[in-house]
Image (spheres, rainbow, N blue to C red):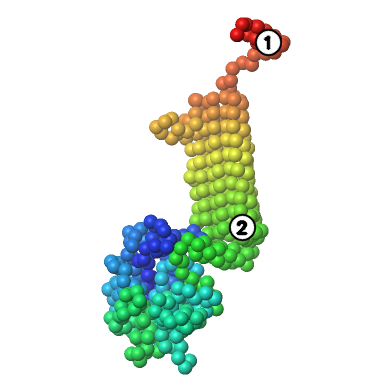
Amino acid sequence: MSTVAGIILAAGKGTRMKSELPKVLHRVGGETMVGHVVRAMRAAGVERIIVVVGHGAEAVQSEVSGVEFAIQHEQKGTGHAVMAALPVLGEWDGPVLVSSGDTPLMTAAALARLIEAQKSSSAHSVIATVRRQDPTGYGRIIWESGKYSGIIEEKDATPEQRLLNEVCVSVYAFHGPALVSALPKLSTDNAQGEYYLTDVPLITSQAGGEVITELFDDETLFSGVNDRAQLAEAAQVLKRRVNRQHMLNGVTILDPEATYIGVDVDIAPDAVIYPGTLLEGVTKIETGAKIGPHSRIVDSEIKAGATVQNSVVLNSVVGENARVGPFSYLRANAQLESEVKVGAFVEVKNSQIGVKTSLAHLSYIGDATIGAKVNVGAGVITANYDGYLKHRTVIGESAFIGSNTTLIAPADVGADAFVAAGSTVSKPVAAGAFAMTRPELTIKDDWVARYRARKQAEKDRLRAEPK
């Protein structure tokens, strides 16, 4: 069976995006547009993928991995871009898929269908087409007596041709040798003075090769993105597609329109996602977890039965049946073991928190290792930075850290130790020891009445003085 190559056209600037970032690097569902096309080609069985770069070439090359690159030094049209890829492709007898890099909604199934159409028919050109309610901007498919006659670009079309709604979506499956033979015959005799890839099917047909079209029902599959509005529209389509698949897999999403899930997120059945939630990056949500409302989780793992409510979790792990939030912030490799409680307004950074430990509320835990069954009271701070270096705090199993305590690292607290509320700990506390730094409480009976009388007398004296 012939192996398949793919060429992705990603050299354009995309001026309508009004951005310094190359158009194909704008993201949809957490992935770059060109990245979506690469994924679809790989999943469709394409063995070699060549990305043609030009504007912002270095940025695209640094972002996309596992592909080959060709440079289009001057942007002279889509046909010229494919010409730039040929020296990299070399001799290729099998099918060659060609797609633009700004079609993030394209699927592997659609590309596989094009490949199969080319292989089964031995056609020299297979053109993906759709019928669009608004065909503006697309090349129209021209038929004569029921036979394919060519593609006319909008700028070259007559008013009658512009009324046609079957359009070329700039995705093709070519017979490799036929493509190589046709490209040198392209001409710039058109309204834009460019080498049109849309002319290749007609050239292959005139050389005796068969040209067929593959009509797709879903017009969004190959929608190109040229500006920020279209980028947002594509994101909405992809969001619905991704959310629907998760729901079909057994995930409860209470409001799919208000839930944003990236393409690399893995969610197990029986997880529950509340409205306003964003799941991004390589994130894994295990069965029975409850996320949201209004939570953001990026590149993190939420274990079975855990709850994350109104909180942000970045590059961290939340253990089984742990509870986070509301309004808490886990970041930079925060590791919560099972049944940990992180309450309201707690920040945990680069710390390991042991089983059944409670960080109830209003605390900052940074660069710390805390054992199992530790109670951390409200307002506790690990002072981990001395102005030059970060230092680590270690708290042993079953220790008690009273409210409004500051632990100045490195100052470890041993297992079963007790630190009284309001203390500042600047040296180690041994296992089982008691630590307290607050001064002795002083109580003066009837002090308030005497204080008020003295202050009132002072006020009366000031009022009586001449102005």
What residue lies at 59% left-to-right and 50% top-to-bottom? 295
Mark 1 vs mark 2, CA separation in Å: 60 Å
What kind of residue is marked 2? Ala
- Residue bearing mark 2: 258
- Residue bearing mark 1: 456
Q: Nearer the viewer, residue 81 or 415?
A: 81
Quadrant where the image shows the C terminus: top right
| Mark in front: 1 vs 2 | 1
| Residue 109 visible within the image | no
Above or below 466: residue 194: below
Q: Position of residue 264 (x, y in %)?
A: 51, 60
What residue lies at 49% left-to-right and 25% top-to-bottom? 427
What residue lies at 54% left-to-right and 44% top-to-bottom? 330
Where disc 2 sits, the SS reads helix
Q: Position of residue 396 (x, y in %)?
A: 55, 34
Q: Nearer the viewer, residue 27 or 116?
A: 27
Q: Position of residue 221 (x, y in %)?
A: 51, 72
Q: Position of residue 168 (x, y in %)?
A: 45, 78
Give the mark nearest the N terminus, 1 or 2: 2
* Quarter of image, res 431: top right
Above or below 351: residue 140: below
Task: Say the numbered circle drawn on residue 85.
Answer: none
| Count of marks placed on residues | 2
Q: Nearer the viewer, residue 321 or 18?
A: 18
Question: How crowded is the residue under tag 1: few (<14 C-alpha within 10 Å), some, or many (20+)?
Answer: few
| Residue 257 visible within the image | yes
User: Residue most toward the bottom?
Assistant: 145
